[in-house]
Amino acid sequence: MTADDLRYFLSVARHGRLARAAEELGVDHTTVGRRLTTLERELGQRLFDRKPSGWVLTEPGQLLVEPAEKVAAAVVSAHELLGGRGAELQGNVRVLTPDSFGAFLLAPALSQLRQRHPALTIEMVTATVHLSQSVRTFDVAVTLEQPTSPRVQGRFLSAYKLGLYATEDYLGSRPPITTVDDLSGHGHTMISYVEQLLDVVPLRRIHDALPSPAQIQSTNIFAQWQAAAAGVGIAALPKFIAEPDARLRPVLPELEFEGGYWLVLPREHVRLARVHAVIGAIDEMITDRQRDLLGLA
């Protein structure tokens, strides 16, 4: 078994399909399949089950993930160390974030990072999901929940505030709202996450505090925001999204919700310079946008 074998193994474990792994590795998909078959033969273990939905890790395959990630990280770290302190940072850094954080906070802050490290490629993947406990598909993650896996290092990043928002036209054409109970009347439309898919605990708490079920449901904060801004109904939105939007007005301003962002880093990536460059940019952005995050701007 070689470090190169483990690189092929990890790519298929992350993507679940030979074609996507081949694209990442820069080879033909038949080469990926051949390398994995050879690796399985040498180990005497089947590492993947070949299913119509993709290549799924077997139990031996899951056991191989952690040592494979450590070897891959060590190889990258060695390249960076040999490059010297003054060397230009290169390579890809995949950042997993909730869609609200990635689009409204991180993306606008990437300009300075690009100026400092023009050879660095940032892959921003936005999704509001639990982190995988078996195969990590990120170099840095921002989550809404405190990480619990011993395989990652995490720290609290920042609190943020949410409130209820709707347009002035919507509020003027509907029954008045003075308490939360008024939201459950037939005259109002609530906008929220898809109830059956809502498994992120902090978002579930907000959902449970409001009338249920919401008549308009989406997994994407952009859809919720735009529906509220178009006068469709009332949505619970982060204040850094809603407050700058002149179309929206607070509903029950005294009712606030607080969420939190956590920074998560795989333990084997702790010493990677390119990862720390991205973390530095995130920390700077959090400092600059603190008042926006807390709805104080």
Image: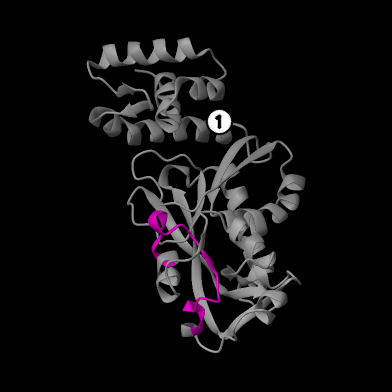
Q: Secondary structure at mark 1?
A: helix
Q: Which residue matches tag 1?
A: 79
Question: Which of 118 and 243 lies nearest the eye of the viewer?
Answer: 243
Image quadrant in which you'd find residue 124: top right
The part of the chain drawn in magenta is 182-202
Q: Is residue 88 visible?
A: no
Q: Eyeballing the image, is 206 above or below 273?
A: below
Residue type at numbered disc 1: His
Q: Quadrant of the C terminus?
A: bottom right
What x and y, as percent, mark residue 270?
A: 47, 47
- Determine whether, in the image, residue 55 is placed left or right of residue 217: left
Residue 159 is situated, as x and y percent measured from the top left of the image, at 53, 71
- The answer to whether 54 is drawn above or below residue 257 in the figure is above
In the displayed structure, 220 sits above or below 159; it is above
Query: Is 195 one of the magenta-colored residues?
Result: yes
The answer to whether 93 is drawn above or below residue 43 in the figure is below
